[in-house]
Image (cartoon, rainbow, N blue to C red):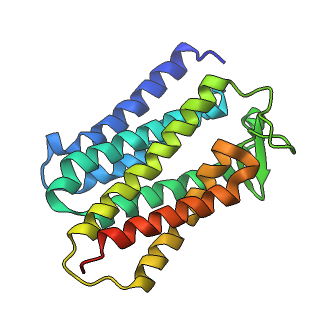
């Protein structure tokens, strides 16, 4: 659906607001307001959804903004400060904000079109990609789906990478139980990635990813 001029101006303004937080360190160094870029990314993305943009395109935009913010933090924040906790905290808050909005915005009777091409998981509406046989539905654009899968994958990788570096550089002994708990935390993201890539083959691939991550954790901490 094509946006009218007013919608384009509003969307551009919301992206500029996101950009302010993305490059906040250029305005005020040493402050943590730049982490709000994760949450700010939710606003223009959902405006596009409300304006009638395809829901899968909306998530490609949202994940791309999160990837860009994660890449910024990996290159210019984590490398200098090793500050991993704030990165994860604000990304988690942004994800929770998006999940809440998927329950509120499509349920708004003023804009029922937001439910198009979505599936209700309880109160929450997410892109309806697969049919009952895990075949890709006809409304899905193959190129958009590939972009959706790639941006989602990079997002998980950008979260795991600094954690691995943090564990590698840690001087403290890390027990096997702690490593298993860390591995279990990533089961849900792995399950989600397996679902969006392979549909019904989610559980075996998730198990494989989890074992591979545990091996990586053991190798990185073998001398501690």
Q: Nearer the viewer, residue 29 or 126?
A: 126
Residue 177 lies left or right of residue 209; in this view the side is left
Q: Can residue 105 be seen at all in this image of the molecule?
A: no
Residue 209 lies left or right of residue 17; in this view the side is right
Q: Tell me: residue 152, above or below residue 213.
A: above
Residue 40 lies left or right of residue 118; in this view the side is left
Indicate the quadrant containing the C terminus: top left, top right, bottom left or bottom right.
bottom left
Q: Nearer the viewer, residue 116 or 170?
A: 170
Residue 41: image location, x then y, percent: 44, 42
Residue 172: image location, x then y, percent: 23, 82
Q: Residue at x 42, y 50 (%)?
A: 157
Q: Can residue 6 be seen at all in this image of the molecule?
A: yes
Q: Residue furthest right?
A: 132
Q: Count the marks.
A: 0
Residue 205: image location, x then y, percent: 63, 55
Q: Quadrant of residue 21?
A: top left
Q: Quadrant of residue 173?
A: bottom left
Q: Nearer the viewer, residue 135 or 63?
A: 135
Q: Tell me: residue 205, above or below residue 1.
A: below
Residue 30: image location, x then y, percent: 13, 55
Q: Tell me: residue 218, above or below residue 49.
A: below
Q: Tell me: residue 88, above or below residue 148.
A: below
Q: Residue at x 76, y 50 (%)?
A: 200
Q: Residue at x 61, y 64 (%)?
A: 207
Indicate the quadrant containing the N terminus: top left, top right, bottom left or bottom right.
top right
Residue 217 lies left or right of residue 186; in this view the side is left
Q: Nearer the viewer, residue 19 or 71?
A: 71
């Amino acid at each position: 659906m094509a946006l009218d001029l007013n919608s384009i101006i509003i969307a551009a303004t919301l992206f500029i607001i996101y950009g302010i937080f993305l490059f906040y360190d250029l305005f005020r160094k040493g402050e943590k307001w730049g982490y709000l870029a994760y949450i700010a990314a939710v606003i223009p993305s959902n405006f596009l959804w409300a304006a009638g943009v395809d829901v899968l395109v909306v998530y490609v935009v949202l994940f791309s903004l999160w990837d860009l913010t994660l890449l910024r933090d990996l290159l210019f924040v984590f490398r200098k400060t090793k500050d991993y906790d704030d990165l994860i905290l604000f990304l988690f808050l942004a994800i929770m904000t998006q999940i809440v909005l998927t329950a509120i915005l499509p349920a708004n009777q003023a804009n029922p079109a937001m439910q198009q091409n979505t599936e209700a998981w309880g109160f929450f509406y997410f892109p309806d990609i697969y049919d009952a046989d895990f075949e890709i539905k006809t409304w899905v654009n193959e190129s958009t789906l590939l972009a959706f899968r790639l941006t989602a994958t990079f997002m998980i990788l950008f979260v795991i990478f600094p954690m691995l570096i943090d564990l590698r550089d840690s001087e403290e002994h890390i027990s096997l139980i702690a490593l298993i708990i860390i591995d279990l935390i990533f089961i849900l993201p792995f399950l989600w990635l397996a679902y969006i890539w392979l549909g019904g083959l989610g559980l075996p691939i998730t198990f494989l990813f989890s074992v591979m991550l545990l091996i990586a954790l053991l190798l990185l901490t073998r001398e501690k």
